Amino acid sequence: MAGTNASEIRVAGTGRILVAPVGTAAPADTTAAWAAAWKDLGYTTTDGIKFAKKDKIDPVKTWQSSSTARLIYGDRDLTLKFQLLQLNEDTLPFFLGGDATAETAAGSGIYKYDLSPAPKANEKALGIEFTDGSAITYRFVIPRGQVTDTEELGLTRTAAIKLGVTFTALSVDDTKPLATILMKDPAYSAV
């Protein structure tokens, strides 16, 4: 509804970030459970998630006019930035580039991760869910994307380790959406 309405102000009070192999079906609504293939990446910093949608639009200038005559759409980028706080078999490979952790010897309790000398594609599906109270739920699903940038990893005595990533959405094909947003929110009702 147009106009001022305080009941339409949303606060992403609590939420989570999930990843799954590309092609994993996402829930069709905001009440269905995420399938077992979706792995919850756990705690994030209080900064939450930063979404950025950037469209590259090139103006067409003409000799006959000082104003732009037409706009040509060139690119669309959708990126998400967040910092993970947990270190485990899902978060470290997500941050570092995909290879799995493995136990060095059966029953040893010692695990290793080998960082490849060359980058490899590590495409994932990404799901984000947040609630605002008990009646409002939002789910964002990116069916295909990849970590395209990581922040410095700080190891200090006085702060938690943060796995800061930038996740970039990738097109599945020209007929499928780059991202889908599901909302259980009365603000979208036409009534």
Image (spheres, rainbow, N blue to C red):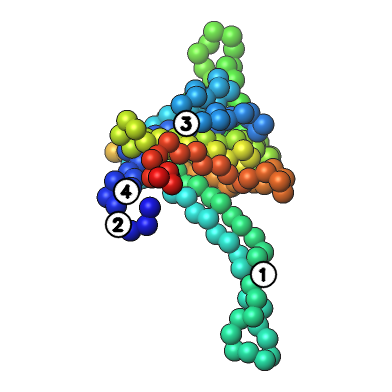
Indicate which label's residue lies in the foreground, 2 or 3: 2
**Quick check: 112 above or below 160?**
above
Q: Hey, what amino acid is under mark 3?
A: Thr
Q: Badge 3, how many Cα within 10 Å: few under 14, some, many 20+?
A: some
Q: Which amino acid, by three-letter code, is at mark 4?
A: Ile
- Tag of residue 9: 4
Foreground: 69 or 140?
69
The residue mark sitting in front, 3 or 1, is 3
Between discs 2 and 3, the one toward the N terminus: 2
In the rendered image, which residue does mark 3 sit on? 30
Dot 1, crowdedness within 10 Å: few (<14), some or many (≥20)? few
* Residue at far top of view: 107
**Residue highlighted by disc 2:** 4
Give me the residue at 47% from left, 47% from top.
81
Residue occupying the point 32% across, 43% down: 11
Q: Which mark is residue 72?
A: 1
Is 69 in front, or is 145?
69
Residue at image location 52% in from the left, 35% down from the top: 127
Marked residue nearer the N-terminal end (4 or 1): 4
Q: Amino acid at mark 2?
A: Thr
Whether tag 4 and tag 3 are in contact, CB under 8 A, the answer is no
The secondary structure type at the circle numbered 2 is loop
Q: CA distance from mark 4 to mark 2?
A: 10 Å
Ranked by sequence position, the earlier of labels 4 and 2 is: 2
Tell me which amino acid carries mark 1. Ile
Q: Residue furthest front?
A: 191
**What separation in Å lies between label 4 and label 3 (alpha carbons)?**
19 Å
Q: Residue 68 placed where, x, y %?
A: 61, 81
How many marks can you see? 4
Label 3 to label 1: alpha-carbon separation: 36 Å
Instruction: Give yes or no for contact between labels 1 and 2 (Cβ–Cβ under 8 Å).
Output: no
**Secondary element at tag 1:** strand
